[in-house]
Amino acid sequence: MSTKQPLVTLQNVHKSGSPAKLVLLACFAASHRSSMIYFSERTVFLLIHEEFVLMEIASLLSLPAGLELEQVFMDDNVLRMHVVATAGMRPCPLCAENATHVRSYYTRLVADLPCAGRRVQLILHVRKFRCDTTSCPRKVFAERLGPFIEAWARKTTRLREAIESIGLATCGEGGARLADRLGIATSPTTVLRCIMALPLPPVGAITHLGVDDFALRRGRTYGTVLVDLHRHKVIALLPDRKGETVKAWLESHPELELISRDRGEDYATAASQGAPQAVQTADRFHLCKNLSEAVEQALARCRAEIRKSLKTQHKPPQDPPPSAPALMTADGKPYSAHQHERYDRYQQVVELRRQGMTIKAIAKRVGLGARTVQRWITDGRYVETNYHHRHRSQFDIYEGYVRRRLTDGAQNIQQIWREIKAQGYSHSDRALRRHLEEVAWEKARRASRSWYPGPLFREESRLAVRAPL
């Protein structure tokens, strides 16, 4: 007979050997290209590549003590195995006393590691015991099969660990594709969920800590990220950016020597109270950002002088350029430094478009939004932008009347609303109250300018050259 096809010969089959065990062993031998199989009462001899390997039936599936294989069948390329629990007693999960009285039976469907590229499903026939301990509040409990299968789990522990290893080595989508290739039915969400359920390593001693906020939902919900500056690894994520939360975490680490943070008051207060022994410094990102903003604001004020000096350097003095008319706004005022810069960008946009560049490339080159570039190109002319115009609303028509009524001593907003509604105001009294709150806030803001200390970049520049806080 040719040796290319495996020949499986069953001999000396003991009377107590079940057909399920024979089918399983035949599949196992065929997947390993065995030449012959000999069965005895508890021992199987496999001849694999002309060598005998001694293997016990009980260790074929590595089932723990108290579980026995009863039946195996193939269904839709899934190997389904009926496993029966045979332990005579089980401990109560509350009082830990052994119970022997079986109350009922039930079935669990659990996924296991694949066999020869086929999915494996364990159909567990387990029992419910009655706890006979009088003081125990648990009267009936289901037997636990851990650590082979955790309580309420739908997959064995070894299958879960395999999915965790695949996820840690790849990612969610890639791990799901690799697992499907290996015969493991899972999804990207399951792979990520198994990774997220892994316990985090202990933080240990930290001497240099970085503190900053991050957006869980931009503009609404923020958290705090803590980074070990020595290892450059994230060690903790806090659910918010409140000073009390950061302070509680810092108090649990008295070994801190340095804290790098932004200039927010909450983090400064938390660092001073939670770790007073640590030196506080501004992080590199905010130092560079604040310095660049300060330099940009300082240079914007002398933009005209810089442009004039550059033109003087590049052109000969004997051929002075003709004086260009000064740019004026629609109301007759000269352009500010910012308006000059924006007009220069418009000219640059027109020139780049003439050279054939796309709108997206132009926007990236000049540092503007694609919609702004599209609007400039579509209009074909430069449109002045007034950043200080006041948004007009229907309330503006009645604002003078409302101010006079308030000056005369009227305090009933509902009455004032009825009066302007009779004059044609179509909005609700809540809209009127909201407008009055905005007017009061604007009045308070203007009054606060008298004590404002000056441009912010001066203070930032002074702090940047000082010693760390």
Image (cartoon, helix red, strand yellow):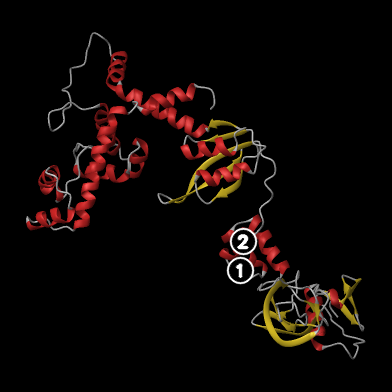
Whether residue 117 is visible:
no
Of residues 357 and 210, the one nearer the viewer is 210
Say few, some or many: other residues with alpha carbon within 10 Å of mark 1 (under 14 / 14 to 19 / 20 or more): some
Of residues 395 and 118, the one nearer the viewer is 395
> Amino acid under label 2?
Gly
The number of callouts visible is: 2
Coordinates of residue 262 in the picture (x, y in percent): 49, 36
- Residue at the far top in the pictured view: 318
- Alpha-carbon span between mark 2 and mark 1: 9 Å
- Residue at the far bottom in the pictured view: 15
Q: Is residue 61 left or right of residue 417?
A: right
Looking at the rendering, in which quadrant would you find the N terminus?
A: bottom right
> Amino acid under label 1?
Thr
Of residues 203 and 31, the one nearer the viewer is 203
Given contact means CB atoms under 8 Å apart, are the residues at marks 2 and 1 in contact?
yes
The residue at which mark 2 appears reads as 175
Location of residue 459 (image quadrant): top left
**SS at badge 1:** loop
**SS at badge 2:** helix
Identify the residue at horizontal 13%, vertical 58% (top origin).
426
Say few, some or many: other residues with alpha carbon within 10 Å of mark 2 (under 14 / 14 to 19 / 20 or more): many
Location of residue 174 (image quadrant): bottom right
Q: Is residue 281 left or right of residue 428?
A: right
Q: Does residue 400 lie above or below 424 as drawn?
A: above
Coordinates of residue 347 in the picture (x, y in percent): 25, 32
Identify the residue at horizontal 18%, vertical 18% (top origin).
323
The residue at which mark 1 appears reads as 186
Of residues 394 and 443, the one nearer the viewer is 443
Whether residue 298 is visible:
yes
Q: Is residue 430 left or right of residue 79?
A: left
Q: Is residue 348 left or right of residue 31?
A: left
Which numbered disc flags the more N-terminal residue, 2 or 1? 2
